[in-house]
Amino acid sequence: MNFNTLFLKSFRVLLIPFALLYGLVIYIRNRLFDKHYLPYSEFNFPLICVGNLAVGGTGKSPMVEYLLDLLHPQFKIATLSRGYKRKTSGYVLAHKNTTALEIGDEPMLFHLKFPDVPIAVGEERLVGIPHLLQDHPTLQAIILDDAFQHRSVKAGLNILLTEYSNLYSQDFFLPTGDLRDEWSSAKRAEIIIVTKCPPDLTAEKKQKIIRSLQPEANQKLFFTCIAYGTPYHILDNTDEWILTPRDEALLVCGIANPKPLKDYLLSQVHTYYQQDYSDHHIFSIDDLIEIKMLFDEINAKDKLILTTEKDAVRLSKFTEELTNLPIYVLPIQHRFLFDEGQKFNNQVLSFIEHFSFNPTKL
């Protein structure tokens, strides 16, 4: 453990009184919702919520993509996100000229990958859902991205993600830990997914995690690992780069938890260098100049720049500057372990197919 990590851990321990106060506020808020002192709305429509209890990267965006891949061939589906760090406010529906600055990097990624799917953003889901249904009245389901803690709307199917290396059952409230909601809130989820597991996760370790999370009898628990795809050029997705042990790479990323990606590169290339930015960093031309300078300093024949898909949507605006750069995007997706992918798929599909419409709901 290096000095910076040790200092950060020690500092967070000193913040325990603030974490307890934060936890008390969250506890009171949840009890007010439970007792109906704070109102919530339940729509007469299939809503699928993807969320977590902690801040940071648990794989919500790849899970939304997984659901879009699964559902949009059969159903008229849409997504509604907050649109973190966008330059707009209120409800915004993506169109052909939309940029990441208008809707945020993650919704923009959905929009680029699924151009025929309505992609909307809005801070207030309670306001955004009726807007989206008005704009697209033939919709059959909406995926609510990162909305588990927004209790003003009650979804019909809640998918809760927790990271293998930071289970919510072993975490603590902000700012000492990473939890933004209490452990008991996990009981509201129909599905819990432990993400970013080792691909060779053993049955023994699986059972240990189950004992730690203690899911309810009606909850389904799944395990996924990260599956990396073939890198493609940021401006031309038909131009691919097959990583080899002789390659040297400059990793450019601004994501919450880049450790799994860095671990993967260690196993794939000869050497990699890194240029880290804050989560959801908005790249400037000065950043691009710095990236090019760092890349030019790498003394190797087989070298490339690697970035994530979320970073790519914020870099791709520099079309002219990127044209002659070997900057490639590394796609990721969830892969279900223990041959349970179809079981998960069936539960999601069944939710929409057998949704019970209730005329008393909003």
Image (cartoon, grey):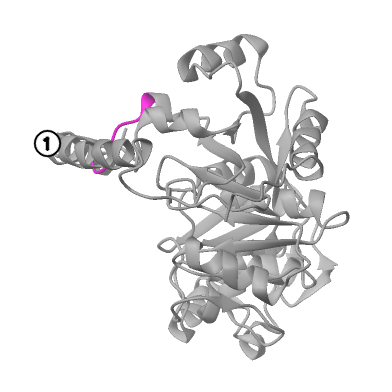
The answer to which of 75 and 68 lies nearer the viewer is: 75
- Residue 326: x and y, percent? 70, 72
Q: Is residue 307 visible?
A: no
At label 1, which amino acid type do we have? Pro
Q: Residue furthest front?
A: 360
Q: Which residue is mark 1?
A: 17
In the image, residue 118 sits, relative to residue 160, either above or below, namely below
Measured from the top left, where is residue 289 in percent x and y?
A: 49, 82
Along the line of sight, the residue nearer the viewer: 227 or 190: 190
Which residue sits at x=79%, y=28%? 343
**Residue 168 is drawn in which quadrant?**
top left
Q: Quadrant of the N terminus?
A: top left
Q: Which residues, given as a range, are shown in magenta?
A: 170-175
Task: Identify which residue is drawn at 73% across, 32% down.
Answer: 336
Whether residue 144 is visible here, answered yes or no, is yes
Mark 1, secondary structure of its residue: helix
Would you place residue 338 above or below residue 36 in this image?
A: above
